[in-house]
Amino acid sequence: MAGERISAIPVRPAIAYHSAPALPSMLTLEKFSIGVGDRFAHQAKAQLRACQLVARDGAEVVPVWNKSNREHTFVGSEPESVLLAARAAVQALDWPGGWHVDADHIRLETVERFLPHSDFFTIDVADSIGQPAAPEAVTAFVDRHPELIGTISIPQIAAPFTTTRAEIERLAGKFLLAVQDAGKIYRHIAEKKGADRLIAEVSMDETDTPQTPPELLVILAALADEKVPVQTIAPKFTGRFNKGVDYVGDLAQFEREFHDDLAVIAHAIARYGLPANLKLSVHSGSDKFSLYPIIRRTLPKFGAGLHLKTAGTTWLEELIGLAEAGGEGLAFAKEIYVGAIGHVDEFCAPYASVIDIDKAKLPTAEEVNGWTSAQFTGALRHDQQHPLFNSSFRQLLHVSFKLAAKAGQRYLDLLVANEEIVGKNVTENLYVRHLKPLFIG
Ligand SMILES: [Zn+2]
């Protein structure tokens, strides 16, 4: 967190071009970081324990607790609660490493209440993509960047990009307004907080079409022009990143794209003087297990870092822990499902583009009411080899956290009463299924 461990380090690019704008000094994000979500603010310690375990294995991965404005609104919480829970966990476990609190997917309209309690800001400009920038701004951008026109050879990319002025104009037209927005939001935060007390991420993942590596290059050139010291960037990758389940898409294509994005980032750091630690942020929607081996073997080719953002599955581990505990805990888990099955369309609507539920595979309330602990956890826990695993069941519960929020204190009391078994599931999930495969192998 800002000021607690890391002092601000002015960033100098390896090769400074005379055209590179001077970037403000900033709080520096560590090379490897994991974004974790803790909707009900009871699992920070269990999550931090997973970072301790992977540190023991030899990988320094710092936790970044993230919660979006939308989640705060759904759950009825305030950004301060995330900071307090994180700080308490860091103190309780005597965590010597870095840690941060991410104001996730904020915009100018939503950032204010996060300012005192976050040091990491995910500046979401996806909605501005495709909205036209001023024609003069587009022309000025293209005039300023003759290097983007023609043949662009980038180390480690097999075939050079070939572009025309018209194409760069089209891309600038598509992305420039979004980048200008990022600049506006960044400057607002920097002015209120101090540029050296914040980490800036720019996210473009919540949009319909993926950004190609040449598009990423244009975006990064424009961010440098805007003097946004971006340390992580979250493009939209090809394929489906559904909530809480594995990647659906072409793995070979993802690997090419991920590789070329890393090459573009390394090139942009040198060419445009962006922060030397700029890295990709993968907004995973949690559990993109099939991508982890690809990411693990590609990062070292560039000496690149990574921010992996996971989110809502901690809540599922809470449910798994309660179900495993049996008794009142299992009864509560069943009650949530029974409530959810009565509101499938309503709960799924806000997430329509990031879930794929086969309604025919959803068990009835009567069936689930007859389940044992092992049947419930077998269906819910993300073990694709388990004969009872049911991804439709899992996805429905994933989006039904509002029911737990509605249960309020009764739910929180159950979490406290079952702290050990719930925490064990939270830690194990993060360590065994995410951190270890991604950073250790
Ligand atoms: Zn995202």
Image: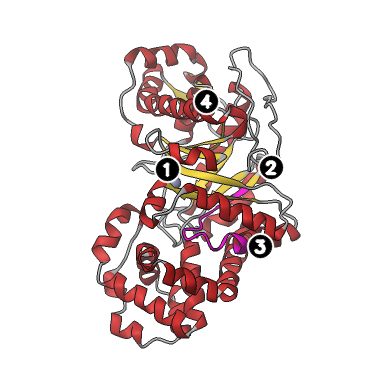
Secondary structure of the residue carrying tag 2 is loop
Q: Residue 191 got which mark?
A: 4
Q: Residues within 10 Å of mark 3 (few under 14, many from 20)?
A: many
CA distance for labels 3 and 2: 20 Å
Q: Residues within 10 Å of mark 2 (few under 14, many from 20)?
A: few
Three-letter code, disc 2: Glu
Residue indicated by mark 2? 4
CA distance for labels 1 and 4: 26 Å
Residue 139: tell me if it is visible: yes
Q: Is residue 16 above or below residue 57?
A: above
- Over which residues does the magenta segment extend? 33-46
Q: Is mark 2 within 8 Å of ligand 1?
A: no
Earlier sequence position, callout 4 versus callout 3: 3
Earlier sequence position, callout 1 versus callout 4: 4
Secondary structure of the residue carrying tag 3 is helix
Three-letter code, disc 4: Glu
Q: Residues within 10 Å of mark 4 (few under 14, many from 20)?
A: few
At x 25% / y 61%, what residue is drawn?
346
Q: Residue 414 in the image: x percent, y percent?
A: 48, 74
Q: Looking at the image, do the residues carrying marks 2 and 1 touch, with CB atoms under 8 Å apart?
A: no
Q: Nearer the viewer, residue 211 or 65?
A: 65
Q: Looking at the image, do the residues carrying marks 3 and 2 touch, with CB atoms under 8 Å apart?
A: no
